[in-house]
Amino acid sequence: MTSQPPIISIEHISKMYEMGDEQVFALRDVSLTIRQGEYVALMGPSGSGKSTLMNMLGCLDTPTSGRYEFNGVNVNEMDDDDLAGIRNREIGFVFQTFNLLPRATALSNVELPLVYAGMKTEDRHRRAAEVLASVGLAERSGHRPNELSGGQRQRVAIARALVTQPSIILADEPTGNLDSKTGQEIMALFDELYKQGNTVILVTHEEDIARHARRIVRLRDGLIESDSPNGDAA
Amino acid sequence: MIRAGEIAESFRIAIESVRVNLLRSILTTAGVVVGVVLVVLMGWTINGLDAVWEQTISIIGKDMIYVDKWNWTGGGNWRLMEARKDISLAQVEQYVTRAEAPELAMPTVRSWGASVTVGNQRLGCSAMGVTFEYGMTPAGEIADGRFFNAIEDEQAADVVVVGHNVAKTLFPGGNAVGQTLKINQRPLRIVGVVEKRGFLFMDFIDNQVFVPLFTFRALYGFQGRSFSVAIKAGNEAMLNTVRDEAVGLMREIRNVPPARDDDFSINEMKAFDEQAKNIRLYIWIVGIGLTLLSFVVGSIGIMNIMFVSVTERTKEIGVRKAIGAKRSSIAIQFLIESALLCLTGALISFPISQLIVGSVQWSAVHLFDFEAATVVSPFIPLDLLGIAAVVAVIVGLAAGLVPALKAALLNPVEALRFE
């Protein structure tokens, strides 16, 4: 794996928030490299800085100091619109609460990133239908989120994350709102995506979920506590 | 760069949003509805007045000039005009003989406080002494019967031509011609009824009776009366020439020294245009004021609801940003929603305006017998609808600007965390 080029390379990153007069560091001098095709779990209790790190990796937020390169491009120097472009093309988000647009059909939800990518309508429909079929929801494309089960909603969200063929899939507690059986199904889908060569980053506080990954990065108090291959992984 | 797909997406979202919150949307647009209704009503009123006015002056004759002691439009110094010497019949006759430019020129004389009687019914009106040529001007056009002829004129015959209202009031059956009415106990035979011409501001015109000049003298006398010259230029292009000639001749005839102002006034139908313009201006000022007010109130309502909409959809904005929506995409989305909201208001106001305009026009004509209203269109003009729609959209864009910027500038992390 080490032969693969790094997708994510962060060096000495800190994130500081000002709360009144006090300065709070959510991340302190964190360095991390993630290569193409990796399956990484970011773990840690709440307040460990894992959400901040995830936001940083997902280009939703920028560090206070340090350097972040995404596919060799320096993200620190990007403005909001450039970051939006990176998120659109390179990053597929999967959220704990699915975050589908409630009034749009499954197909429209999956299409949305392509709308912002400027793809033509017919191409968009075709591509979104393909991806929706690949997560096993071809029959449900005309349904709205409230007509779908939790597992189905998360599959739609995963399809939305995949539709632009991003460099990484960034999943934030993707099973947190699902029962354990459905959670396992969703994790099986992530495992499958990994096997197909996708780079998957899971953010979780559950050991069971983290065990699916091939590498586990543990955070505590804004520092990386450990970063090791996952011996349990199949 | 904003892409067509994003715009289409924004329209879809906006329509959906307006549809889902239909009642809220309609209530929100109330201010805009009032504003648009006012714009449309104001425009329609001005158009209507123009139509009425155009009708009035075209009926009376755009190419008519009246030389009179008084300025009819009320301009000039009243005391100075009072001090002017009366215009005598001899002076008018001199002018009529010497003038070359006009098609027709004739003396007229008037008694305002006249009255006519039929049986024991008495009607106040104004009486004009005119020559038979008056029947050749637009003001003397006959609806029924004829104008008195040259012989009757010369012989000072006891004949009279009555205005529309006089005939209608005294002979509601419509058989005025051939009947006899009395002025100052003197019986006069009605030979004709003049076409209805009084409109809106000039109703008195239909309350007149016309008798030959010397019949007038027999009835009222010429003593202490100032004549005026009715001049028909022939066409509008001749107006300047005719006016200049009239001024020159009248100054000469009335011995006005070169340095002195005219001691008479030139009255033209066109001069009344000034008054019409003023009325139009007042309507504009009042209308624009009310419209601005309601649009300000309306846009505050729209802005408020857009802030609510942005807050309600903070999470959605976060999601959209996470999957790649740029600031401009988010801003456009809310601007379109706000503009669409106002456009909805405009669409609601069109039938309302039409209903008001239609019923006002209908009641003016049918219930209040207000004949001037017949020339006013009962429909709102299409160009006004277009203008109103454009104005509504602009108001929407303006009102939505701040909320849209607020949405566009939201931090995606915080927006996603919003519950």
Image (cartoon, grey):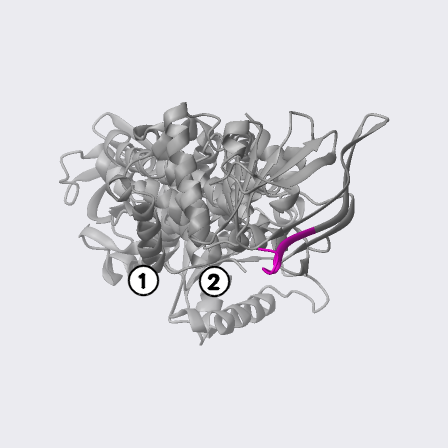
Extreme-bottom residue of the structure: B100
Label disc, if present, on residue A61 of the rendered structure = none
Q: Residue at x 45, y 25 (%)?
A: A177
Q: In which chain is the residue bearing label 2?
A: B
Tell which circle, 2 or 1, labels the residue nearer the N-terminal end: 2
Task: Estimate how packed mark 1 is, as few (under 14), some (14 to 19) or many (20 or more) residues with alpha carbons within 10 Å.
Answer: some
Q: In the visual, does B160 lie left or right of B294?
A: left
On the image, the x and y values in percent for residue B119 come to 20, 28
One can see residue B84 in this view: no
> Looking at the image, is B91 positioned above or below residue B286?
below
Q: Secondary structure at mark 2?
A: helix
Task: Please identify the quarter of the rendering in which residue B362 is found.
Answer: top left
Q: Of all residues shown, which one is farthest toward the front?
A: A231
Residue B259 shown in magenta: no
- Span of residues in magenta: A1-9
Could you say where residue B48 lies in the image, as x and y percent from the top left?
A: 38, 46
Q: Looking at the picture, which amino acid does disc 1 mark?
A: Glu
Q: How many numbered discs? A: 2
Marker disc for residue B92: 2
Residue pushed farthest top? A179
The residue drawn where x is 61% and y is 60% is A5
Above or below: residue A135 compared with residue B89: above
The residue that label 1 is drawn on is B133
In depth, the one of B277 and B122 nearer the eye is: B277
Q: Which one is nearer the viewer's eye here, B154 or B359?
A: B359
Quadrant occupied by the N terminus of chain A: bottom right
Residue at (69%, 33%) from the top-left corner? A219
Residue A230 appearing in the image: yes
Image quadrant in which you'd find residue A47: top right
Q: Chain of mark 1?
A: B
